[in-house]
Structure formats: structure tokens, C-alpha cells
Image (cartoon, helix red, strand yellow):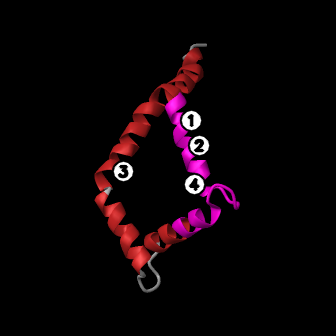
Amino acid sequence: KLPMLFYVALLVIVVMPGPYLYGPQRRIFLRTVVRIAIPLHSVSFADFLLADVFTSLAKPISDLGMSTCKLARPFVQSFVDEDSGDDGAE
């Protein structure tokens, strides 16, 4: 349960608004990610560079998704076990 909490905390810190914890740099990063995801304008060097980094990290990013699922399984399983406790017998 603790590693899953770290994943959530990291995601919250990255998208958290505000001037603390390198706020301007996080906003620039998120703006660049949005420009990469929705390419409606000319490509700047920052867009090209970050897209190249994401391409290079394709395998580790996919592994991150798989490891998140494996880490979340016990947490999700506890909710499923609680819900299926009365197996519908009347």
C-alpha cells in the first residue's frame, strides 16, 4: 500500500498548482506536455526535445503502468473482497 501512496503523491506534486516546489518549472513542463499531446501549432525545440525524451522512455513508461497495476492489486482486491462478502444467497 505504501508504494501506491508514493505514486499518488508524486502525481499530486507534479500537477499541484502554486508557486512552491518549483511551481513555474512544473507549469512549463505541463504546458509542454499538453502541447505535445494536442499538436495544434508549430513545434518548438522544447516540444521536440520532450517528445524525444518520452519516445526514449517508452518501455520504462509502459513498465511503470504494469508495476502500478501489480502494486494496486492488493489494494483493489481488498475492496472486491469486502463487496463480495454476502455472495447473493437469500
Q: Where is residue 31 in the image (x, y as percent from the top left)?
A: 54, 70
Q: Do the residues labelled 2 and 1 touch (CB within 8 Å)?
A: yes
Circle 3 or circle 4, nearest the eye: 4
Neighbour class for label 3 at 10 Å: few (<14), some, many (≥20)?
few
Which picture quadrant has residue 52?
bottom left
Q: Is 30 drawn above or below residue 74 in the view shown?
A: below
Q: What residue type is labelled 1?
A: Leu
How far apart marks 3 and 1 lie (CA) works out to 18 Å
How far apart marks 4 and 2 lie (CA) works out to 9 Å
Q: Position of residue 18 (x, y in %)?
A: 70, 60
How far apart marks 3 and 2 lie (CA) works out to 18 Å
Q: Main secondary structure of the magenta part?
A: helix
**Considering the numbered disc 1 on the image, is that residue within a helix, a strand or a loop?**
helix
Which residue does the numbered mark 4 point to in the structure image?
Answer: 14
Q: What residue type is labelled 3?
A: Ile
Q: Is 9 drawn above or below residue 52 in the view shown?
A: above
Which picture quadrant has residue 66?
top left
Horizontal side of 79 relative to 51 (left or right) equals right
Identify the mark nearer the N-term, 4 or 2: 2
Q: Is residue 9 magenta?
A: yes
Q: Which of 89 and 44 is in front in this view?
A: 44
Identify the mark nearer the N-term, 3 or 1: 1
Q: Which amino acid does label 2 sit on?
A: Ala
Q: Is 50 drawn above or below residue 12 in the view shown?
A: below
Classify the position of the C terminus by image quarter: top right
Q: Position of residue 27 (x, y in %)?
A: 59, 66
Which residue does the numbered mark 2 point to in the structure image?
Answer: 9
Identify the mark nearer the N-term, 3 or 2: 2
Which residue does the numbered mark 3 point to in the structure image?
Answer: 61
Q: Name the residue located 52 percent from the left edge and 35 percent from the top edge.
A: 4
Which residue does the numbered mark 1 point to in the structure image?
Answer: 5
